[in-house]
Amino acid sequence: MVSLYDGGVYLINGSEIVPEAEAAKVTALTGKEAVKDEARKGTIAYSILEKHNVSGNMEHLKLKFDAMASHDITFVGIVQTAKASGMEKFPIPYVLTNCHNTLCAVGGTINEDDHMFGLSAAKKYGGIYVPPHIAVIHQYMREMMAGCGKMILGSDSHTRYGALGTMAVGEGGGELVKQLLQDTYDVAYPGVVAIYLDGRPMPGVGPQDIALAIIGAVFKNGYVKNKVMEFVGPGVASMSTDYRNGVDVMTTETTCLSSIWRTDEDTESFLALHGRGEDYQKLDPADIAYYDGCVYVDLSTVKPMIALPFHPSNTYEIDELNANLGDILRSVEKEAQKVSGGKADFTLTDKIVDGKLLVQQGIIAGCAGGNYTNVIEAAHALKGKSCGFDEFSLAVYPSSQPVFMDLVKKGAVSDLMEAGAVIRTAFCGPCFGAGDTPCNNGLSIRHTTRNFPNREGSKPGNGQMAAVALMDARSIAATAANGGILTSALELDCWDDVPAYEFDRTSYDRRVYQGFGKGNSEKELIYGPNIKDWPEMSPLADNIVLKVCSKIMDAVTTTDELIPSGETSSYRSNPLGLAEFTLSRRDPEYVGRTKEVDKLEKARVKGQDPAELDAELTAVFDQIRTIPGQEQVAILDTEIGSMVYAVKPGDGSAREQAASCQRVIGGLANITKEYATKRYRSNVMNWGMLPFQMEAEPEFEVGDYIYVPGIRRILDGDLTNIKAYVLGDRVKEITLYIADMTPEEREIVKAGCLINFNRNRNQNK
């Protein structure tokens, strides 16, 4: 059972929940009056944020992190941006892992060229470099960097180490650049929601089951959006730290800002095992702590879960699904028709065989599934059994070389291989479409992090489509043992016999470059031919004209739809090359439209009248001059850019390229009802785009123009009531607004992007 409290709660002595409306009970229980403002300070999150805040104002945080992490589809752009902004060394430990473009399978040398760039950057600036196949980013950070009371920033949305007492945040590259320049991460003090765990999980119920039960309860209603999830309650002690890590990493799929857990002796043992016992401290809420909400989870009632395509919140108990296969699967098929836009067929009801669902593939991988405990349990389930020789296949990716080594020593790898499973090295590809793409019309069950549309690598635009359902490793193993027939782990009786993990760091000692504090400025960065500098971007003009180049009315638009994952990741070090894929899965005509707009702006910057290139602009500016107060507006003084309207964009990955790709080919603004995540909105601003929102329905279409006068003046003042004008058959006034921006964010947008902002600042020193 997962239930949500309506309103805030007080947590007394870490064990008793008192709804805010019953605050008088606090006095009866403790002899102290319930003072909300003081009790807010009793959360674990408050103490860690206070320690890392340098603003002197806990309502408006300016945070400095203890360490950072990036992988090989983000670190090149981050280093390039920081270098262009004047960075001379890495001021804090910065881990560069190579777990996304690991296989170097497409694009010739460009993936390994990025890896060599990363190694050269670690040598030049003093970084930590983890070579391909050694560890996925988050497992390395758990094993070697996270510790109680710390904060870590990562350029990957699943940067979550709360189960180790670390508040970790996944953000776009611009926020990491700020830390490299010794600036701060600026955010209003977030709400903190208690995730109260009670009871203990049933044997066979794994961390993915717990996570999916929570995600299903909180995602759609935004209960924890941009808040901190703080895991408390007696149920925490029923889970090993390795198990907790598997729950924690999935908190990203709730759209929360960060997570933190109470710590105990098991946390201490985990850190000591990894040679970092000194990083342990006991973290608990104060005797009276106030939370902005509470999610109550009775762990003993959670059953094996499945998240059907196309979101981790599309959750069912496996038993519930098996009892209602036809009705539930038909609803997914209808959603698949919307996803494919009629360009590909995807069916599930044809996979019902004798009343059971036959799946085509199983994957256990990455920071969520590849942990020691998950793989050991899967191996026990498959010992002496067979995956069969039909269409179903199983692949397992241990999350790091130390985990892999111990699985070998324990015999788990041979048990899996004897059953027919394929064992691979540490790699994030199955999470984002760069490994194990299923067959056309195939259904893959995965203990990974996401099951967004086409994230498994299929291409509906080319007439091919597959999909992913998320499950725990235990139920995936049970399904494999049943030849691919969807099976709950509760059908087997082999669980909770997990031998103690023995960590051996030898593979790290012999392969990981430990360069923090040892940077050598004389070293040269190694550039492959695909690694390109960011193109120049213009500062914001006083007035702007936006051409609507895409209008997306879906309830949510993921970052995978804004810029596809998978094989396109090979171009992440080439801003203009990657930008060719922008919105390619959602609106293939977008790139051509925005590049035409970009030509006009580039001509304007050079002093050429853009109306000479597009006669339509003459009529547009004739209309603008009919607006009172705008009679003298000149084309050469008005910035021209493209705009995307989306209802709720940015769910999913932290990748900054979802915004930068718009920007480098002419993007100047988004208009939305809301932003799905803070990190995408931050990316938009760091790349110099205006994060407009509007409450009304959009009464404009692709091809229309929108004029916003006095935008620089607006950014200096009130952002709540911005007058804009749709130009079409007639001039129509609309009202936009921008949610709160920090002073620095306003200046970044006015400068045209973060790089320009930093260059201007350096020149003025």
Image (spheres, rainbow, N blue to C red):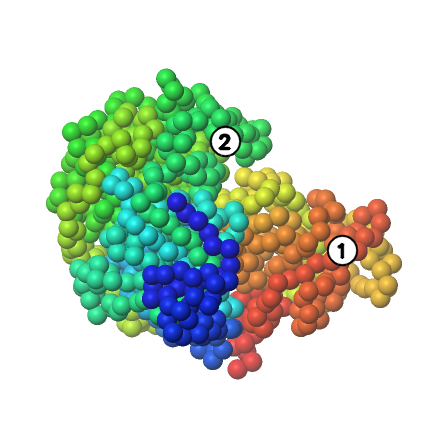
Q: Residue at x 20, y 43 (%)?
A: 496
From the top left corner, tell me how far across and down residue 622 is, in percent.
85, 55
Task: List the single residue furthest toward the top.
Answer: 354
Q: CA distance from mark 1 to mark 2?
A: 37 Å
Q: Quadrant of residue 438?
A: top left
Q: Quadrant of residue 69?
A: bottom left
Could you classify mark 2 by the number of other residues whose Cα lies within 10 Å: few (under 14), some (14-19), or many (20 or more)?
Answer: some
From the top left corner, tell me how far across and down residue 529 is, in percent.
43, 52
From the top left corner, tell me how far across and down residue 79 is, in percent.
42, 63
Read off the residue under disc 2.
332
429 left or right of 510 in image = right
Residue 183 visible somewhere in the drawing: no
Out of 466 and 473, give the one closest to the viewer: 473
Which mark, residue 734? 1
Q: Residue at x 40, y 27 (%)?
A: 323
In this view, 492 is above or below 262: above
231 left or right of 545 in image = left
Mark toward the start of the polypeptide (1 vs 2): 2
The amino acid type found where label 2 is placed reads: Val
Q: Secondary structure at mark 1?
A: strand
Out of 210 and 148, give the one closest to the viewer: 210
The amino acid type found where label 1 is placed reads: Ile
In this view, 755 is above or below 641: below
Residue 759 visible somewhere in the drawing: yes
In this view, 668 is above or below 287: above
Q: Quadrant of the N terminus?
A: top left
Q: Nearer the viewer, mark 1 or mark 2?
A: 2
